[in-house]
Amino acid sequence: MLMLSNWLVYFAIGIGTALMAAGVQIIVELIAHQKFSLLKTYLDKCSTDKENCLYQPILIWMSINVGITLLASALVTYLQPMAAGSGIPLIKSYLNGVRIPGLLSLQAFVAKCVGVVLSILGGLACGKEGPMAHSGGIIAAGIGKGRIPWFKKYIDLYGLFRTDHNIRDLVAAGAASGVSAAFGAPVGGTLFSVEEAASFWNTELVWKVFFSAMVACFSTNFLLSAYEGHPTQLSNPGLVRFNTFPNLTFDLIEIPVFIIMAAIGGLIGSLFVVMNYKLTVFRQKYLHRKKWIKVVEASLVSGVSALAAFVLMFTIKDCTTAEPYNGHAFNTTMGCDGEGHNAMSTMFLTTPEGCLKALLHDSYDNYSVLTLVLFVTVFFFLGVWTYGLSVSSGVFIPSLTIGAAWGRLIGLGVIQLFPNQVLTSKAKDVGKYALIGAASQLGGCLRTTISLTVIIVECTGDITFGLCIMLALMISKWVGDFFTTGLYDMNVEVSGIPLLSWEPPPLCDHVYVSDFMSQPVMTFLPVEKVGHVYECLMGESFNGFPIIEQDPNCDSRYKGKLRGIILRFQILVLLSKKVFCQEGQVPSNQNSITLKDFQKTSPVAVRIEDIQLTDQEKQYVIDFRPFMNQTPYTVSLNFSMPRVFRLFRGLGLRHLVVVSDEFEPIGMVTRKDLAKYRAEIKKGMLHMEHLTVENR
């Protein structure tokens, strides 16, 4: 029965993620269609009208963008700041074993889903694919906990999967389902969760995660196909599909060109990461001190995005009669005097996903070189500026769009340099160069190889180009790693999250646990005065407390052999439940406290400041023995750092007690202590840093 319930939960995660993804996609399409239809009407009217009224469409465009983005940023900033960005770095940190308050809350889900819709409609250079992974993780956590929030309380439905281990596995499945629903790539979504997010895996979990991702992909396909009026055809497997390339073939002599493009992608990706890092540090120092400044900045970016698009469309009169790939795409005749349409408008009067498809599939002569050069330059800086705003947004689609634009440029250059090789119209297909450019740019930013290769192959539906995509992603990662870390890793470092990498830092074999442990240790006796415990929790922020047996031969009260460890959260639950009594007695409610009492209480919901005790209650005693962990993990002083690191990484530890030869606790190791040592490889040189960790 438990096994069946387990599989049903993973099935429900896939269904829930699909419903969320399809809802976001349909809402964006409906409202975006109305928005760009209105803009097209005013642009066409004012570009041909004898009266100069071009100020009207730009004011309307900027007003729509600023107004919608204002709502998007305010929702994230004031409701749940953890919903900002794509959420993948935070999900990755959570699955690595780091507790992040508010990350999987209902407020984060609302801010994430509604916020990403508003961000895209607000004209920001972002995508919805990254937030799908975070939203899927929230859905998974909510289904796993089996309770519904109701006016600061919870309505319990079931509690079979509330342990940290189970929730972590479910969140991994939710992240994979989100990526699967976004790209229609269940295998790629599973590998993305393995490669980029999760830390602890086994064969059974991989099967469950893949099952959930497949259910999400199929359900999203069915819902979107039903929305388009043909539910049985299942022609929409994901929110973003590159669609079929009719001539996706390559010659071996083109591989050197693809390798050069991969190196360019690594360089441009590194530049993106460096610029965004500088901007993020600047924001933290000067802009994010007050919440309203975050909202103003996001609104400013959306307004500038509309203004930049209008200026490019107005000044670059690149008129073409070539039909766009999407017959329903919006474009304007501004500046073309009735001859064709403005090519630049095809890329701006659409969502970022629509722009990406246009760059991948439009014909050879749809865009001039000048149009592509200006577009990729402007869109690159808008992408750098947008990522890190206090809005729900992803970086997948902007990276792919930037790469597709400069990849198309290189394709045009190859055709010009080797005209004898392009005698047929089939050879003039620059879509494959745009695809390699998109893959190279994404690899240069994110530095993820295996999963992205599979995702892009699944999006194109053609395995024959898999070798070229893999080469592009691998080489762009190598080139990018030579200069900087990946974008997600940079976000984790700047946020100060104690994330543990796959391997311990190099050159640390000579560092022992005595060099980086936290000391002295605050300990408790098995039976303690309630007042003393209360004062300790009020004065310190420690989350783990060793329990010792007092040494009768020692004058110090808090010196003795280790008997166990108890967590701060457990003590808070015991105090809130009044599990204490007068000395020599047994609390009347001690036997009524069960594991469910700890599971149904959120660790961030109970605070020591919210617990009120009378003077008489502070004279009572509390017995930790029935509730403490009597077999904690311990190490001696001569344990090396790599061994400690592997213990934390392999077992998912949060606390490790350091004991003396007499088995007395003399230090504690937490993830923050290990995160003090960070290794980076820049320009081929290994740099070691010993960081200072502050409690904030």
Image: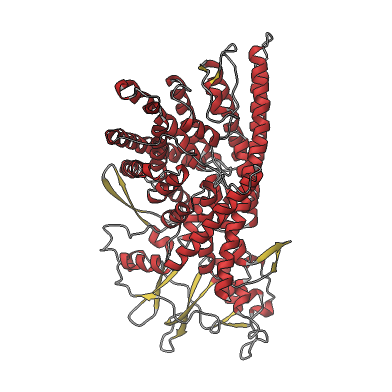
Q: Is residue 157 above or below residue 591?
A: above
Q: Position of residue 9 (x, y in %)?
A: 59, 65
Say left or right for 409 vs 123. Answer: left
Name the quadrant containing residue 661: bottom left
Q: Position of residue 545 (x, y in %)?
A: 49, 74
- Farthest residue, direction top: 50
* Residue 125 in view here: no
Q: Position of residue 431 (x, y in %)?
A: 42, 32
Say left or right for 653 vs 69. Answer: left
Residue at coordinates 60% horizontally, 39% vertically from top-left? 119
Figure disc tally? 0
- Farthest residue, direction bottom: 584
* Residue 438 in view here: yes
- Could you say which is closer to the camera, residue 377 or residue 41? 41
Name the quadrant containing residue 531: bottom right
Q: Is residue 27 above or below residue 367?
A: below
What is the quadrant of the N terminus in the image? bottom right
- Could you say which is closer to the camera, residue 527 or residue 73? 73
Q: Is residue 366 above or below residue 147?
A: above
Residue at coordinates 48% horizontally, 59% vertically from top-left? 210
- Could you say which is closer to the camera, residue 231 or residue 517? 231
Q: Position of residue 396 (x, y in %)?
A: 48, 42
